[in-house]
Amino acid sequence: MGKRDDLIAQYADDLRKKCGMEPDMALLTKVTIGCGPSIYDADASTVAGSQPSELETVKNNFLMKKLGLPDSPDLMNAINSVIETYGKSERNKYRAVVYYMLTKHFGKESVYK
């Protein structure tokens, strides 16, 4: 297994143990690939759930640009809900896991088909 496969396994583990959900491995793999090289960078691979600027970036670059959602208060509510599910005290909130949960939340799996 390569480094990406190891990371995908780690993300799946987080979804099971920290978020209480069984991951759709095909979708998780596609979301991870969609994150590009950021998954290999210690800083870029995680989402700082307590930084408003970071959450704005997730909203603008992922929800609006990637998933094509219109700007609304629902977007930030969904991000906060996902951060809550992951666990506010959880230091490492992996970007791929957060993006995966947001994709599922909005039913936008078709973006990754």
Image (cartoon, helix red, strand yellow):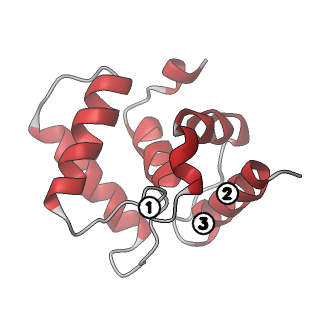
Task: Identify the residue position indicated by label 2 in the image.
Answer: 12
> Would you place residue 10 above or below residue 67 in this image?
below
Q: Nearer the viewer, residue 61 or 101?
A: 61
Q: Nearer the viewer, mark 1 or mark 3?
A: 1
Residues marked 2 and 3 touching at CB (< 8 Å): yes
Label 1, label 3: how many angstroms apart (C-alpha)? 13 Å
Position of the C terminus, as image quadrant, is top right
Residue 46's disc is 1
Specify which label sits upstream in the sequence, 2 or 1. Answer: 2
Residue at (44% x, 26% y) in the render: 108
Residue at (41% x, 78% y) in the render: 91
Task: Identify the residue position indicated by label 3 in the image.
Answer: 14
Q: Amino acid at mark 2?
A: Ala
Q: Secondary structure at mark 3?
A: helix
Residue at (33% x, 75% y) in the render: 88
* Quadrant housing residue 74: top left
Q: Nearer the viewer, mark 2 or mark 1?
A: 1
Crowding at mark 2 (Cα within 10 Å: few <14, some 14-19, many 20+): many
Label 2, label 1: how many angstroms apart (C-alpha)? 15 Å
Residues marked 1 and 3 touching at CB (< 8 Å): no
Residue 66, percent from left and from top: 37, 25
Residue 83's disc is none
Specify which label sits upstream in the sequence, 1 or 3. Answer: 3
Residue 82, percent from left and from top: 36, 56
Residue at (71% x, 42% y) in the render: 25
> Would you place residue 25 above or below residue 107 in this image?
below
Q: Nearer the viewer, residue 8 or 107?
A: 8
Residue 44, percent from left and from top: 43, 56
Crowding at mark 3 (Cα within 10 Å: few <14, some 14-19, many 20+): many
> As drawn, which residue projects farthest toward the right?
1
* Quadrant housing residue 16: bottom right
